[in-house]
Each structure stands twice: as structure tokens, then as C-alpha cells.
């Protein structure tokens, strides 16, 4: 943006929702609308249909007159009500955006999204400066991956973590009732936060997940077999959380130009002769396939099941019950599994962006930061777009135990974000059963 | 059982939970305990650890003294608190069961389970008769597949259907936000009830699932492509529900002796050189793998994506966003997604079994039957074990439309079983977008 004072004339607003949807991204949309409404400097509030694509196509919906009760229902609805996109605008794309902004006298731009989306926001803002076009540009954070730097956590994560925790709570009990080895693949390309959330399912000492593999450390297929064998020999069952982004730790230049290890899921797809997809940001597509889980299940069966574990009822035979589930899109969009804290913070992040945009000559990204002290409290801070754009926050190494588990101390971090979980009750004290039972 | 009058002496009780767990199978367990407690003819109430396997191993837990508040918490906990098993007792196995029953003076046997479990119950009961051993034998229904004959529906189904409905509600919105083709694989080996439950996600005329494939009818891979192409051309997106049990309709003799079509998932596993697992009932294992969904996604990409749909931003290129998720075990055990009606009925089915066993010289299975009339009401009936054992209830053909969808009239049947779903709200009227967008 340019100019050195608070705007006094009336200007229009564009809001977009970008990247993978979450259960609370509509809370932020409604928060922005609520933060803007009633201010005399705000003209039309235009929702861009399918993010930047809606801007260049001049495809908008007016949002300023929606009644509050309808806004409240929209806020509670999962996924992006405006529609989303994974487009990353280049210079030409952005020129088109400005044509539309100028023609429509758009002076406030709010872009709700993740890591890549904050980068889009930064590029649009830089172009506004170059054009000498007065534009307040705000990024509102959103990602179930929880991988934005400068943030204690991001809207969308708490609800996705709640889904993962509740799925693992149930699956731990399922695995206890019908013992075997169970692998669940959890979303998170580069950051292990969501996979680590599975640890919330542990209540008793024999509860799973017994092993948790995150992409912050390398994954070793042989060590994995040893881990599984050790747990199974102890408990007669084994519940495992695996991030979709696990890799062998060897850095290689990727199609997006970054030098980082190739995810095992990608290697498998190539080996199996499948077409590997990349989005327009050069990021590989990992979700929407069960290949990684299936590979790990077969890997266990071939190397442990057939050689080591006697069949429980048929003498001379060996067997091992191994299953893999890939949680998939339900993690980000399941209707009816939200964290109340996540909802409230997502709404507030939107309001804060609106208020900051109206307050002065600033642009930036809203960051959620945790206050020190026993009780959980956060504050919202405006940070530079460049500080958050294109960077990835990782799970702190202090939480990663033996490259195969998550420390109990992670509970302090994550519990307030997820909130209350269902109560479960067991009939008996934890009782290890013999391997092969 | 033998004898011709109501028991007057004190006898002990054994309760077991068998087969795949559900979100409400512990409600039935608690229902049986509540129905028995306080009756002077009831001695110890013994829970068999891991079903029939616990009986032959003399591995029990005493249940008669658990305080009511703890029972209530156990009832709300998903999965089988006693542990489960898929063992199908043969004659030798049953002799062992009677040794234990006789030694422990067990006179009441309650077995909570599905189709195969009711058969187990029948065999045990027949053996009791042959031995002249007085035993009241009751089967309490449970299965997320909803495939027990003589029942309008079964405990466990409503909660699993709620999970499927909420997952599809969210995924429909996700697919609307980021358009493409999305396949979700739903549990249900022989019966399409759970897959059909996905239709509850439809609220507006363009809402998915747009296509629903159940195992009651044959699946044609070419027709599937035509269906998907037609929907995608109309809406610019396509959400699909597919039962894990779909097949090409050609009957073949199976390892369990039944003559029925081989599931496509099994054919794929064989083609891919994977070991195909059968349980001790001779039933093939379908869940716990993403292979079917992945196959269908690749099938679409190869035959539609690469030839028909132009890339939205890169001229000359073709593309199609296709993803597949396999819902997996969360359908039966996710903590915190239950139908209130399902909970209440599962509890009542357990109580009814206990009361029937104490009332007279009868054995049987508790069946839930729906009363005629506008308002939803059910009654519980004791039916012969032989009437339900080993038989499979299918989705009525009147609900299956064009071999690729479920009729709106199914809503009347299923809505009362699932209960209230989350409210979702859209920003705009349904608006078909162009294919390839």
C-alpha cells in the first residue's frame, strides 16, 4: 500500500478464502465481516468466489447485508463458503487483480489461508505498493497443519486435532477389543503437529498410539519393524500414528525448487507407476490415496507376520492382523467435530484483521501468540507479511522422543487448543496380553 | 436349553461381545446388566474377556457390583469393553464352553453381536439342549452393517450412519470449495445401508454424494466412467459413495462355501499380489486397505482425466483432480459421534434380553421392529435364534435408483435412526460451474 495516513474516503472490500478448507475458516470470514460492518469507510464487502480466481474473473458475492443469524450459521459450517483455490498468482495474474480492484475501488483486501496463501497476500501487497495503489492488505491465518511461523498455533488446527484425537481414542479401544497392528495415516506434509495430536488418545499406560512418526525426523523402515515388534511383543497389539509426509531423511531437489527429502508416499507412487501430482505452488499431492498405509501394512506382514507370530488357533501357521486407515479429508472438514477454542479464535483473528485494517496505515498477518502463565490465554498481533510468508513452522524437537514417539509434555501445549474430549471408561486395569494372542 | 418352567434356583450369567465393535455395543452390555441386577435368581454376572475365547480360557471379569455411574460411563464408551473376537466355535470349542459353564453354574448366556454371532449363539444353544443343560441363551443384535433379518435396523447402525453422514456433509462442502472428483469408500460387505446413509448429506439440489454404489447390484467399470463424466460435466465436481463390497455381479463359489460375486477389492488384492485374508467364518477381509478407492481414482484419471478435461490454467494440458478416501474403522468406533436413538435402543435391547431370559423358558434373539404410523416408534420382540442366524438383510431394491444412486424415500427410513445432524449454511444458491473449471 502507499499513503501515510488513515483512510478517510469510502472504499470497498474483497475477502478471499484460499488453500485447503478447515472446520473454522468460515469463522474467520464472518469475523472479518463483523469487524468491518458499521464503519463508514467501508463500502461493499465482496466475497471472491474461489479465492484469487474469483477476483480475476470478477466473480464476487456481496456480503455486507447478510443478517447476523445467517452469518452465525455460516460461521459454524465447515469448509470455505466462498469456495477456495490453490492458484498462486504470478505477476500477470496480479495485474489482473489490480484491474479489478481499481475498477471496483477495492481498498481493503483480506486473504484467509495458510503458508502459501500468506505468500500470495505478500505478492499482491508488493504489487499494490509498486502501483502506488492505496490498499490495506491482511492475511488471516488458517491451516490444519499448524505450520505458520510466528504463531503459537493457527485456526483450523485445534478442530482437526480434535478429529484426530477422537478417531484415535475410538481406534485405541477398537484395537484393544480386536488386537492386532493398526496404522493410521494423518495429514501434515512437512509438520508433525496433527500426527502428534494423536497422543491425546492415551489415558492409561497401555493405551495407543504406541508409536508416532512425524516428518520432522527421518523414517527408517527397518527401525520401524523393530519398534512395532517390540510394542506388539509387550502389549499383544500396536496402534501407530504415521504422518503422510514421512521420508528417509535424504535431501533432494524437489520440483518446487526446495531441497528436502522426498516423501515416502511420492516414492511409492513413482514405484507403482502412478502419476505424481503437484499443485501450482510446486507442492506434491499426498492426501487422497491409501498407498502409504497399505505399503506399511504389507511391509509389516511380510517381514514380521509371516515369520514370527504363530496363528492363535491353527498350529503350524503364522499370522498377524495388520490394518491401515488413511484419515483423509474428514480431518479438515468433518461436520460436527470442532474445538470451541478454535472456533472462537478463528472468529477473533478475522475481527482483529478488520480492526487493524481500519485503524491505520498498516498491512500484515494476524498472529496468535500465547501468553505466559498457567491459565491458557492468547493475544493477537499484527506481523509483517514477509515474516510469515513461505516459511514453515515445525514441531519442536523437545516433543519428539526416540524418533518414534511424542513426549507427554506435548499435552500441555495441545490440550487447550483441542478442548474437552469425550469421556471413555474401561472395564479393567491395563493388562498386557502375550504376543500372538 | 432344557426344562419346562421358569428357573427358581440361583444361576450365574455370562455376557460376551462379539465381532466388530460399534459405538453403542457397550450400551447393550450395560442394558443386560441393568436388566439382571436385583433379581434373586441371578448370581454372578461374568463378562467374558474377548467373547467365546474368554469363556474357553476361563477369563472373566465380574460385573454385578459395578456402580451405576461407572456403568453409565462404560455405556457411553465406543468399542467392546469386554474385548471381542471373531472366533466361530465348532463342536469341540463348544464342549469347552460347557465345561466352564457347568463348573461355574452358568445358567444365562447373553451374546451381543451380528449375523455371525447370532449363529454362534444358536450353536451354543443347540449344544446346551443336547447336553440337557438348562441354559437361557440370548442374542442381542449389533452391527453397523444393519444386515440382520427380522430387524427394522440394528444397534450400532444409527451411529455409524451418523459418522458417514457427517463425513459426507463436510466432504460435500470441501468438494464444493475445491472442485474435483472425490470417492469415499464406506464399510458394508454385503449390505449397502451404511453407504446409502451418505445421502443424508444432500440438502441442496447440487449437493453430493452425486453417485452412490451399493453391493446389492453389480458394478460396471465402464458405466461408472459414464456416470462420473455426466455428473462432472453438469456440476464441475462429483462426490461419490462406494461400498467396500462392490462386485461385478458374477456369482462364484467363495472360500466360505457361499456362491456369490467376488468383491472387486479382493480381485484387486489378488491382482496386486497381496495376501487375501479370511476370518474363521470364511469371510474375506475388506477393510483396512485403501486399494479399492485408489484403483477407482486411477481408473477415472486414466480414462477421463488425461483425455477429456483441459487444464484450467495451462493451455494444451489436461487434468482432473481425483481423490479417494477410505473411511475405515472410524465408522464403527469414532469417539464422540453417536446417535441418541441408537444409544437408547442398544441399551433397551440389552435390558429386553435380560428380562426375557428371566421371564420364562425361552431363548432367542431380540429384534427391533418399527411400529407403523407417522411418528417413529419401535418395539422389541424375541425371535428364534434360527430365524436370524447366518442370514443377511439387504437394502430394499426400491431404494436403489439406476444402479448408481439412492432414492430420496430412503430418508424417511434412516433419519429417525441417525437423529439431528449439524446445521450447515451456504453463501449462495446452487450454481453449476463449467466442467474443467
Image: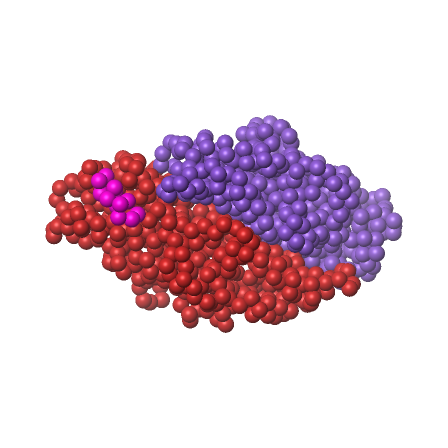
Chain colours: A purple, B red
Location of residue A157 (image quadrant)? top right
- A336 w.r.t. B314: above or below: above
Secondary structure character of the magenta stretch overall: helix
- Residue B138, position in %: x, y? 25, 50
Q: Residue at x 65, y 35 (%)?
A: A218
Which of the pair B388/B418 is nearer the observer?
Answer: B388
Location of residue A399 (image quadrant)? top right
Q: Residue at x 58, y 60 (%)?
A: B296
- Residue B421, position in %: x, y? 48, 55
- B23 w.r.t. A226: above or below: below
| Image quarter in which the C terminus of chain A is found | top left
Which of the pair B369/B323 is nearer the observer?
Answer: B323
Magenta range is B89-100
- Residue A106, position in %: x, y? 78, 55
Residue A155 seen: no
User: Is residue A145 shown in magenta?
Assistant: no
Residue B328 falls left or right of residue B150 = right
Q: Residue furthest front?
A: A316
- Residue A210, position in %: x, y? 51, 35
Q: Residue at x 71, y 44 (%)?
A: A115
Residue B362 falls left or right of residue A93 = left
Amino acid at each position: 500500500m502507499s499513503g501515510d495516513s488513515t483512510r478517510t474516503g469510502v472504499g470497498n472490500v474483497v475477502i478471499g478464502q484460499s488453500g485447503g478448507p478447515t472446520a473454522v475458516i468460515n469463522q474467520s470470514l464472518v469475523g472479518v465481516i463483523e469487524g468491518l460492518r458499521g464503519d463508514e469507510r467501508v463500502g461493499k464487502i465482496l466475497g471472491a468466489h474461489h479465492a484469487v480466481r474469483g477476483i480475476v474473473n470478477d466473480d464476487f458475492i456481496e456480503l455486507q447485508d447478510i443478517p447476523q443469524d445467517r452469518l452465525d450459521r455460516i460461521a459454524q459450517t465447515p469448509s470455505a463458503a466462498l469456495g477456495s483455490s490453490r492458484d498462486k498468482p504470478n505477476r500477470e495474474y496480479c495485474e489482473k487483480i489490480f484491474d479489478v480492484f481499481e475498477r471496483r475501488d477495492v481498498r481493503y483486501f483480506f486473504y484467509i489461508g495458510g503458508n502459501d496463501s500468506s505468500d500470495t497476500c505478500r505478492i499482491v501487497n508488493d504489487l499494490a505498493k509498486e502501483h502506488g495503489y492505496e490498499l490495506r492488505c491482511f492475511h488471516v491465518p488458517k491451516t490444519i497443519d499448524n505450520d505458520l511461523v510466528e504463531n503459537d498455533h493457527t485456526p483450523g488446527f485445534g478442530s482437526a486435532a480434535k478429529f484426530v484425537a477422537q478417531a484415535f481414542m475410538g481406534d485405541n479401544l477398537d484395537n484393544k477389543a480386536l488386537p492386532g497392528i493398526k496404522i493410521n495415516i494423518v495429514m501434515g506434509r512437512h509438520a508433525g503437529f496433527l500426527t502428534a495430536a494423536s497422543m491425546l488418545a492415551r489415558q492409561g499406560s497401555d493405551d495407543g498410539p504406541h508409536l508416532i512418526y512425524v516428518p520432522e525426523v527421518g523414517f527408517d523402515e527397518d527401525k520401524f519393524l523393530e519398534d512395532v515388534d517390540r510394542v506388539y511383543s509387550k502389549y499383544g497389539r500396536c496402534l501407530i500414528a504415521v504422518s503422510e509426509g514421512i521420508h528417509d531423511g535424504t535431501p533432494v531437489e524437489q520440483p518446487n525448487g526446495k531441497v528436502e527429502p522426498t516423501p515416502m508416499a511420492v516414492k511409492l507412487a513413482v514405484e507403482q507407476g502412478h502419476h505424481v501430482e503437484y499443485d501450482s505452488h510446486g507442492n506434491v499431492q499426498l492426501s487422497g490415496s491409501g498407498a502409504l498405509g497399505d505399503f506399511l501394512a504389507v511391509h509389516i506382514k511380510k517381514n514380521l507376520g509371516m515369520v514370527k507370530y504363530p496363528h492363535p488357533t491353527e498350529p503350524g501357521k503364522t499370522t498377524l492382523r495388520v490394518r491401515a486407515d488413511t484419515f483423509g479429508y474428514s480431518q479438515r472438514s468433518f461436520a460436527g467435530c470442532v474445538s470451541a477454542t478454535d472456533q472462537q479464535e478463528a472468529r477473533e483473528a478475522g475481527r482483529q484483521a478488520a480492526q487493524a485494517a481500519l485503524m491505520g496505515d498498516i498491512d500484515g498477518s494476524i498472529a496468535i501468540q500465547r501468553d505466559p502463565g498457567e491459565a491458557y490465554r492468547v493475544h493477537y498481533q499484527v506481523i509483517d507479511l514477509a515474516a510469515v510468508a513461505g516459511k514453515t513452522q515445525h514441531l519442536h524437537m523437545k516433543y519428539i522422543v526416540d524418533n518414534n514417539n511424542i513426549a507427554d509434555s506435548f499435552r500441555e501445549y495441545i490440550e487447550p487448543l483441542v478442548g474437552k474430549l469425550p469421556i471413555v471408561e474401561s472395564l479393567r486395569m491395563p493388562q498386557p496380553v502375550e504376543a500372538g494372542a
